Amino acid sequence: MHPLQGTSPIKNIGIEELVKRKAEILILLKGFDETFGQNIRLRFLYTADENVSNVKFIRNFEVTKNGQIESDIEAVHSFEKL
């Protein structure tokens, strides 16, 4: 997740302005599928008008007993209302 800190290029821009500018947010994920022994690359594109407010993304990964991170790619978009 991109925290909106002082150096963020969208920190002081409201959602209305992002919609007006037709802003898009691209999420790139890279992982390794141990079952098939290959790298996986996923791309998700969100437009500003798909914005949702007052939500929290649901954690879509867990750390195994071996210390590896396992991610549920289908749950990348999952969130809950605050």
Image: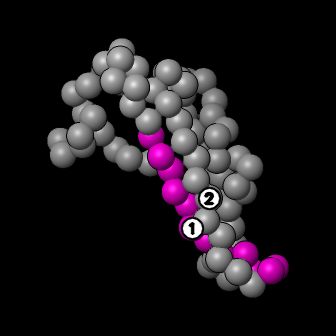
At 64% from the left and 40% from the top, the residue drawn is: 77
Which SS does the magenta portion mostly show?
strand
Q: Say what secondary structure mark 2 lies in.
A: strand
Foreground of the two, 31 or 79: 31
Cβ atoms under marks 2 and 1 closer than 8 Å = yes
- Residue 24, picture quadrant: top left
Question: The C terminus is located in which quarter?
Answer: top right
In percent of width and height, residue 18 lies at 35, 24
Q: Alpha carbon of mark 2 to alpha carbon of mark 1: how far?
A: 6 Å
In percent of width and height, residue 46 lies at 53, 36
Q: Say what secondary structure mark 1 lies in.
A: strand
First-in-chain label (2 vs 1):
1
At 27% from the left and 34% from the top, the residue drawn is: 10
Foreground of the two, 74 or 40: 40
Label 2: few (<14), some or many (≥20) within 10 Å? few
User: Does residue 28 appear left or right of residue 7 in this picture?
Assistant: right
The residue at which mark 2 appears reads as 42
The residue at which mark 1 appears reads as 30
At 70% from the left and 55% from the top, the residue drawn is: 73
**Part of the protein shown in magenta:** 25-36
User: Does residue 70 appear left or right of residue 44 in this picture?
Assistant: right
- Residue 41, picture quadrant: bottom right
User: Does residue 33 appear left or right of residue 20 in this picture?
Assistant: right
Foreground of the two, 49 or 31: 49
Give the amino acid at mark 2. Leu
